[in-house]
Image (cartoon, rainbow, N blue to C red):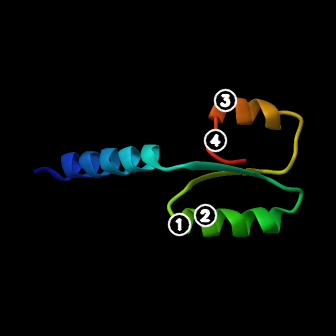
Amino acid sequence: MSTNRAHDETQETQETRQGQRQHIFAVNHDPEFLDVMRMLLQDERYNVTTTNYVPRTWEQIAALQPSLL
């Protein structure tokens, strides 16, 4: 198997697994808190989106349809 093909298959497998993970969306005013949350939740194999509250936060939530907010 060529190196490129092996890389493509590995990337596809990772994307498939990532697509099957639960998605958590965290909103908080403290960037350090968000960094810790992201690190802990990603270690537990969740897809994580974090943001400080901004005017477009609700649009992001609607678009991403997270499992937990």
Q: Is 22 on the left-hand or right-hand side of 6?
A: right
Q: Are marks 4 and 1 in contact (CB under 8 Å)?
A: no
Residue labelled with disc 1: 44
Q: Residue at x 88, y 41 (%)?
A: 54
Of the residues under marks 3 and 2, which one precedes in the sequence?
2
Please state the horizontal and vertical placement of residue 35, each as a whole percent of the image.
72, 65
Say if mark 4 contacts mark 2, CB within 8 Å: no
Density class for disc 4 (Cα within 10 Å; few <14, some 14-19, many ≥20) is some
Spatial separation of the CA atoms under disc 3 and disc 4 = 9 Å
Height in image: 36 above or below 29?
A: below
**Looking at numbered disc 1 in the image, what kind of residue is underneath it?**
Glu
**Image coords of residue 56 (percent x, y):** 83, 33
Q: Position of residue 50 (x, y in %)?
A: 72, 52
Tell me: 18 left or right of 59. left
Q: Earlier in the sequence, mark 4 or mark 2?
A: 2
Q: Which residue is the site of mark 3?
A: 63
Q: CA distance from mark 4 to mark 2?
A: 14 Å
Residue tagged 2: 41
- Give 56 or 62, whichever is nearer the viewer: 62
Q: Amino acid at mark 3?
A: Ala
Provide the secondary structure element on which disc 2 rests. Answer: helix
